[in-house]
Amino acid sequence: MNEMILIGNAGNRRTTGLQSARLKLGLPPALELNYIDVLQGNISLTSFVEAHRSRMDNPPILRLDAPGEHFEVERALIALGAPDAPHCKDDGLPEYNDEHRQPISMKNAFAMKEQEGQLYHPSQWFRGYRRLLAQLTREAKSLWREPHWINAPEDIAVMFDKRSTHDVLSKAGIPVPRRLGEPEIITDYEMLREHMESRKMPRIFLKLASGSGACGVMAYQINPRTGAELAITTIGVENYMARPPMYYNVKRLQRYSDKTTIRQIVNWVLRHGAHAEQWVAKTTFRDRAFDVRQLVVNGEACHSIARVSSTPITNLHLQSKRMSLEDVGLSDSTQADIRYCAEQVLQVFPHSNIAGIDIAISAGAGHPYVLDVNPFGDLLYEVNHQGCSTYEWEMMQLIAEQGASGKKENIQ
């Protein structure tokens, strides 16, 4: 079997989970190329491959993992996204109205100190990550005629941007919630309110375009009769007299009803790029809303989990309850609809093999619609499929794929 190069963060739960699965299946450990080493210029994909050339008779399998949960990586990506970052080439993907995002210099980025939970500069972080993905793409193409990416970097860049994801899924006819308006138009709180009124959409989800794990998500509603506002969100804010406010990610959802705070948070999210969509009522289990994380590997739906919550935001780390699809009462036909919908999503990304698709079932009509596409959505604890964990299943599919490829070459 071809060697695997794992580009990620050493020692985190994703890396250790994948390496444990390979060990269990008798596969050699993946070669680990750490984000921080690449970002600090200590090594490149090219020099890494040269250093391990003796182990690579055939082109390796390239796997990109999530860059999160590592402050030095986050800071370096923000620096890479700075307007004065040298020798940077962007990835050619469409831009969305970034002229009002107030970028910071490389020097100021590297001067940032770690403070748990703080949200630093998400739009510049995403530009830096896109630049890194573009760099890795160029290097891989210079090394191999057809690089074998598990998920192609250009696909990851699109999946990681909720605006771009909504665009490509809509064009492909995949069911998604209605978008409130073009991202370029909705630039501040007043414009958001104006669109909600004109489109008769009093309940929306406002999402940080490049956020993950519910980071930067707000369930926002306006009472059409009284004008009262309510925002439920993972974003906290602290205001100071002598320095700018600090925005941070909370582990318990916050509820805001005062207009001043809501306006402040909404403006911050919009300043860093946001996606606003209709808040479609989800089907419930015992008066609790739920949606489904459906994993797709090599075109086939496999592991799934229902995320059941008393709040509109169902991410499991926010005290939502994990349940099987059977336990929440989904019929066989509805489960089949969910699997089919998720498989159709991954077909929109033909150069990618793995994604976690978040799917909700609309209350009443019972139709599935796609909430999010996560290129790193396979970190699912205590969820098995045919007796395998997510990483074990993925590695088994690689073994089968390599075996089929070897047979084909022998026949030829």
Image: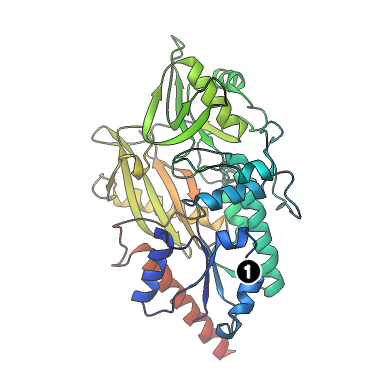
- In this orientation, which residue lies closer to the viewer: 84 or 177? 84
Task: Judge from the rendering whether residue 314 lies leftward or rightward of residue 70; answer left or right.
Answer: left
- Residue 388, quarter of the rendered image: bottom left
Q: Is residue 305 left or right of residue 111?
A: left
Quarter occupied by residue 255: top left
Please say if 372 is above or below 190.
Answer: below
Question: Which quadrant, please, contains the C terminus?
Answer: bottom right
Residue 191, picture quadrant: top right
Q: Which residue is mark 1?
A: 45
Amino acid type, callout 1:
Leu
User: Residue at 37% of width from left, 53% of height from top?
Assistant: 336
The location of residue 192, given as percent across then percent down, is 58, 23
Residue 301 appears in the rendering:
no
168 relative position to 396: left or right: right
Numbered disc 1: secondary structure? helix
Q: Position of residue 216 (x, y in %)?
A: 49, 36
The residue positioned 57% from the left and 48% from the top of the image is 75
CA neighbours of label 1 inside 10 A, class few (<14), some (14 to 19), many (20+): some
Position above or below: 86 against 385: above
Q: Residue 352: where, in percent of width, then height?
A: 55, 61
Instruction: Please name the residue shown 62% across and 31% down the image.
Output: 271
Residue at 25% across, 45% down = 329
